[in-house]
Image (cartoon, rainbow, N blue to C red):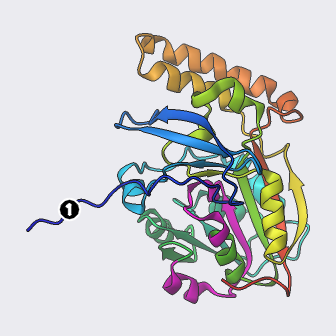
């Protein structure tokens, strides 16, 4: 007797996965704009803590079904700028990049930290290809919260980086606990996330790239992340809502809007113009509520809870 296909959605929940409040509102309904696959996806927001989350959430099978080749790559210069944030601290002996994909970030960071061993973790074969290409010292295929994976990585690293990774995870709090488990005492966690408080989310609606339904499961406010890191035994070293801003909101929105329309022949010139505006306005926007991302550096202390 053939087995029934597994569901691609978890049951819809009536409470916030971050704080447990039942005061929810629908923030967004969107199809898969990047790939014309069927389905409409809902992003709810908690009225108490402002956490935004996909509801109902995709199951692991659903995430695999709607997977893509990964988010657009950041430029080498942008990745170097992110790695430069760690220069004031002692040079790490070992660094784990979680959700590394093709290891673009370790490759750029190696230019600044020449004596650091960079390892990468990713659930796709890309991490193994990156190791074969010499971009990583060690490649770990899987998910950080998987017990056998975490057992291999426990207490090995001075830095763990997660750049626009938590948005894709089914349980961000569990992912943070696992990252702290992989760190040595006194090690640093480097995080970059899309900022759900960005005014661009209101102006652009479903065309705002960080919504990226159905691949982004969570959009976490900075205040919530700070509180959770402190609750898990971290000291917050720094936060930044300016330099992580990526100037692509307008150009990506235009590209997504025109891709499936009768105006598609105009997409090339329109996207070029929007990209120019993105870069022209970026110095001003990153100092306002239109900044679209934030960065946190946290230090693991002796009171950190093991996963």
Does 80 lie within the magenta span? no
Tell me the quadrant of the picture where the C terminus can be found.
bottom right
Q: Residue furthest left?
A: 1
- The answer to whether residue 284 is above or below residue 145 is above
Using the rendered image of the protein, determine whether residue 167 is visible from the camera's viewpoint: yes
Using the rendered image of the protein, determine whether residue 252 is visible from the camera's viewpoint: no
Q: What residue span does the magenta drawing correspond to? A: 146-174
> Where is residue 224 drawn, in percent x and y?
79, 57
Residue marked by disc 1: 4
Q: Residue at x 43, y 15 (%)?
A: 264
Viewer-side residue, 183 vs 23: 23
Viewer-side residue, 23 vs 7: 23
Does 153 lie within the magenta span? yes
- The answer to whether residue 253 is above or below residue 211 is above
> Where is residue 38 drawn, in percent x and y?
34, 37
The answer to whether residue 168 is left or right of residue 182 is left
> Where is residue 36 drawn, in percent x and y?
37, 33
> Where is residue 44 drawn, in percent x and y?
60, 43
Q: Residue at x 84, y 85 (%)?
A: 303
Q: Residue at x 62, y 28 (%)?
A: 205
- The answer to whether residue 53 is above or below residue 272 is below
Tell me the quadrant of the picture where the N terminus can be found.
bottom left
Secondary structure at badge 1 equals loop
Residue 72 in which image quadrant:
top right
């Amino acid at each position: 007797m053939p087995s029934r296909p597994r569901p691609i959605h978890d049951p819809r929940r009536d409470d916030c996965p971050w704080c447990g409040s039942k005061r929810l509102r629908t923030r967004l309904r969107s199809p898969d704009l990047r790939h014309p696959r069927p389905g409409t996806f809902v992003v709810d927001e908690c009225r108490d803590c402002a956490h935004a989350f996909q509801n109902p959430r995709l199951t692991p099978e659903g995430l695999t079904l709607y997977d893509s080749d990964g988010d657009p790559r950041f430029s080498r210069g942008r990745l170097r700028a992110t790695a430069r944030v760690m220069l004031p601290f002692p040079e790490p002996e070992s660094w784990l990049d979680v959700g590394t994909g093709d290891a673009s970030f370790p490759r750029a960071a190696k230019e600044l930290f020449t004596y650091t061993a960079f390892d990468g973790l990713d659930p796709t074969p890309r991490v193994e290809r990156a190791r074969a290409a010499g971009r990583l010292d060690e490649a770990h295929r899987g998910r950080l919260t998987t017990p056998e994976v975490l057992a291999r990585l426990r207490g090995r690293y001075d830095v763990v980086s997660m750049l626009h990774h938590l948005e894709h995870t089914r349980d961000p709090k569990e992912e943070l606990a696992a990252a702290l488990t992989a760190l040595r005492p006194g090690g640093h966690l480097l995080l970059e996330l899309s900022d759900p408080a960005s005014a661009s989310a209101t102006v652009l609606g479903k065309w705002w790239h960080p919504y990226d339904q159905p691949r982004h499961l969570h959009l976490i406010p900075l205040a919530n992340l700070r509180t959770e890191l402190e609750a898990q035994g971290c000291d917050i070293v720094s936060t930044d809502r300016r330099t992580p801003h990526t100037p692509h909101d307008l150009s990506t929105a235009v590209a997504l809007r025109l891709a499936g329309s009768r105006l598609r022949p105009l997409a090339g010139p329109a996207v070029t113009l929007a990209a120019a505006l993105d870069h022209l306005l970026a110095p001003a926007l990153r100092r306002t509520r239109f900044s679209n991302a934030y960065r946190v550096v946290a230090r693991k202390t002796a009171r950190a809870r093991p996963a």
